[in-house]
Structure formats: structure tokens, C-alpha cells
Image (spheres, rainbow, N blue to C red):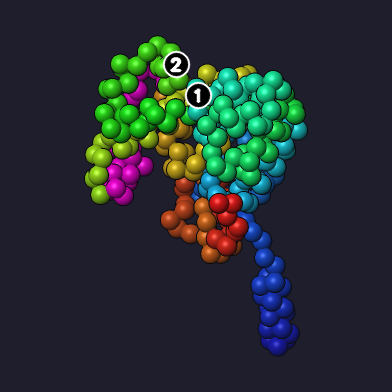
Amino acid sequence: MEKLLALLLFFALAAQAQYKQPYQLYTKDGKKTTYKKLLKKSGEAQVVLFGEYHDNSLVHWLQLEFTKDMAAQKYLVLGAEMFEADNQDELQQYLDGKIDQKALDTVARLWSNYKTDYKPIVDYAKENNIPFIATNVPRRYASQVYKQGIESLEALSDDEKSWIAPLPIPYDGTLPGYKKMIEMMGGHGGENMPKAQAVKDATMAHFITENIKDDYVFIHFNGTYHSDNFEGISWYLKQNDPDVKVITISSVSQKEVSKLEEENMGKADFILVVDEDMTKTH
């Protein structure tokens, strides 16, 4: 009997070793969960913050599939860190078919990996008449905050201020993510470094809040650092409306996807663990 059990265990382990999966979803407390449950919970939210690794091919594939599957059950609004607010008109012209991709490349500040990683989602929105919002602060203003301080934004024109969260922007320097940023930089840049980050977070939250609709889900794509640990964009969304229903997704990379590592616990409502050998897009 013992030999039989040992043999069965051997074959079970061998089968498990042969079965390789590129990702696994977990709840914030480290319990394995399913894509079906992610869709269900996301469908109950007003906002889904899909935190990504900008260069991960699997994450980008799953974002597109997630968008398609959510669209099958809910009306959607999409938005992304990868588009800056002052390029909304140009993005809208593309969505409306008034300009083509070549023209968009010319008139908008697109990321270098746009065509491989974000164009498929934008084109899906275009084909299905789904609103797509450029949420991020124009990078020149984040740079200005880093160099001159957040108070310098007050001198901007009214038109320029329309591309930023309403001033004055609240800032909590005790939030762990902002404190960690200072530590990682060895103090270089002082408080202006996390404040520049906060301006991005606040602006993305502002344009999400402005475009939330009843019975719609707003799916927002952003670097995972902007929403990890329920900080960043999520914190500002709650400042705008304490009752807003937000679901966060964090992307992490691990050598093994079969168990969530301790350091990745609690980062989001759903944690997407991707095999560290996954192909990078750039």
C-alpha cells in the first residue's frame, strides 16, 4: 500500500512539474483565485485600476482580453497613464476616424511601445465606440514640480490648469509609497520627487472621477506603482469621493507563480503573478 501511495505521489508531482502556466491570480491575502472571479468583482466596481509592468507582453495581452470580456457584461470607459490630458483632442480625433495612425503618431506624444502594447486596446475602443480618456498630467508639468516645486503650478494659465487636477493638490508625504520613493533616491530631489509623482496620481484620479458614469465601469491602465497598496491613484480617488467603488490589480513578477511571495502580499485586491521569464516587449 505504501509503495502504491508513493508511486501515485510521484506521478502527481511529475504531472505538476510538466504543467507550466505563465501566470496565476491571487487575492490580496495570498489565496489563489480565478479570472472568472476577477471579472465578477470588477463588474461590481465603478473603477478598475489595472496596474501593469510597461514591458510585459503577457500583462498587455491580459489587459486586452480583460477589456473584451468586461465589455461583454458592462458598458465601459477606458483610460490610461500612457496618454497625457493635453492630447485628448488628438486621441479623440483618432477614435472618431478623423485622423489615421500615422497622423496620431505625429500630433500626439505616444510612448515608444505604443504600437505593440497599447494600440490594440485603443483600436478595440475605436471599433466598439468605447470612450477612451487621456488621464495623465502633461509630463512637462511633472518635470516643473520636480524642479520648481508644486507651488509653481499656480502660475500656469487657465488652459494649462485644465490639464491638471484642481489646485491646490492635496499631498500626504507620510504615505509609504512616497516615503519609499525618497528612500530609493537617497534623498535626491527631496520632497519634490514624490510631489511630482503625486501630481500624476492626482491628475489621473481627477480625470477618472470626471468620467465615471452610472452603470459603467471605468478601466484604467497604469504602471503598477501608481496604484499598489491602495495608494497613488486609488488614494486620490477616495479623496474625490470616499464612496467610490474601486478594484485594484497589481502585476508582479516571480520565479514561481504557484505561491504568492510574502513581499507581494496585500498590494491590491487582485495580484497578477507573471513568470519572470515572460517575454519583454522592449
Q: Residue at x 43, y 13 (%)?
A: 159
Towards the viewer: 98 or 266: 98
Q: Position of residue 240 (x, y in %)?
A: 44, 21
Q: Amino acid at mark 1?
A: Ala
- Mark 1, secondary structure of its residue: helix
Which of the numbered marks, if any, corresponds to residue 162?
A: 2
Q: Position of residue 105 (x, y in %)?
A: 60, 32
Using residue 85 as the reference point, say whether residue 169 is left or right of it.
left
The image quarter containing residue 76 is: top right
Q: Amino acid at mark 2?
A: Ser
The image quarter containing residue 196 is: top left
Q: Position of residue 103 (x, y in %)?
A: 63, 28
Tell me, yes or no, whether the highlighted magenta stretch contains residue 76. no
Q: Relative to 165, does residue 280 appear above or below in the rendering? A: below
Numbered disc total: 2
Q: Residue at x 28, y 22 (%)?
A: 152
Which of the numbered marks, if any, corresponds to residue 182?
A: none
According to the picture, the residue beneath numbered tag 1 turns out to be 85
